[in-house]
Amino acid sequence: MAKASNRSRSNERASSVPEDLHPTVAASLRGARQRYSTGRRAIVEVLAGSGRPVTAPELVTMNPALSVSSVYRNLAVLEQVGVVRRLVTHEENARYELAEEFSQHHDHMICEGCGIVTDYLPPPRLELAMGRALASIPRSDGFTPRAHHLQILGLCGRCARAGGR
């Protein structure tokens, strides 16, 4: 039951992309003296609809009009201006997703077997507990917590059935 709930919550994230996504992305790029080119727009579209972080090769598979070299170049620019967030796992390729300012807060479940990363929208009760935990962090060194990104490590259903690592 929880599995279906997590899947629907992940799909909920993909469909909750702000209506002003493209104008906001364009403004972020303009602020860095960059254009919102057709290729960058296509990447943002794929990331907005993917429902999970994806690799550059997956982006090309999801939109064959994109070329691998331009995807990497554009991802670097989009990451630099804060539109895209790069996730590094034990996989060969990093995974990319829209930054939370362009989607919504979520955490990740990372399979230690195959490396797949799945979005996880924690229940409000867990988010409240995390907020309390962040507020309780001693700040003697001047550090002020602003946000968190939780990574839950384990095995996806396929890898668990196959016997793990």
Image (cartoon, rainbow, N blue to C red):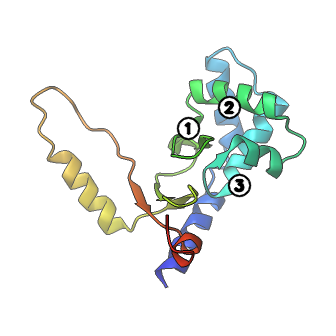
Mark count: 3
**Residue 134 position in % (x across, y down):** 22, 47
Front one among 116 and 162: 162
Packing grade of label 1 (10 A; few <14, some 14-19, many >=20) is some
Mark closest to the chain's N terminus, 2 or 3: 3
Mark closest to the chain's N terminus, 1 or 2: 2
Packing grade of label 2 (10 A; few <14, some 14-19, many >=20) is many
Q: Amino acid at mark 1?
A: Arg
Point 85% across, 38% down: residue? 66
Q: Secondary structure at mark 1?
A: strand
Point 60% across, 50% down: residue? 53
Residue underneath mark 2: 75
Q: Classify residue 108 as left or right of residue 51.
A: left
- The residue at the far top in this view is 33
Point 60% across, 34% down: residue? 83
Q: Are marks 1 and 2 in contact (CB under 8 Å)?
A: yes
**Residue 165 position in % (x across, y down):** 49, 64
**Residue 20 position in % (x across, y down):** 66, 43
102 lies above or below 104? above
Q: Secondary structure at mark 3?
A: helix
Residue underneath mark 1: 86
**Residue 78 position in % (x across, y down):** 64, 29
Mark closest to the chain's N terminus, 1 or 3: 3
* Residue 130: quadrant of the picture: bottom left
- The residue at the far right in this view is 65
Q: Amino acid at mark 3?
A: Gly
Q: Classify residue 158 as left or right of residue 73.
A: left
Residue underneath mark 3: 49
Front one among 27 and 111: 111
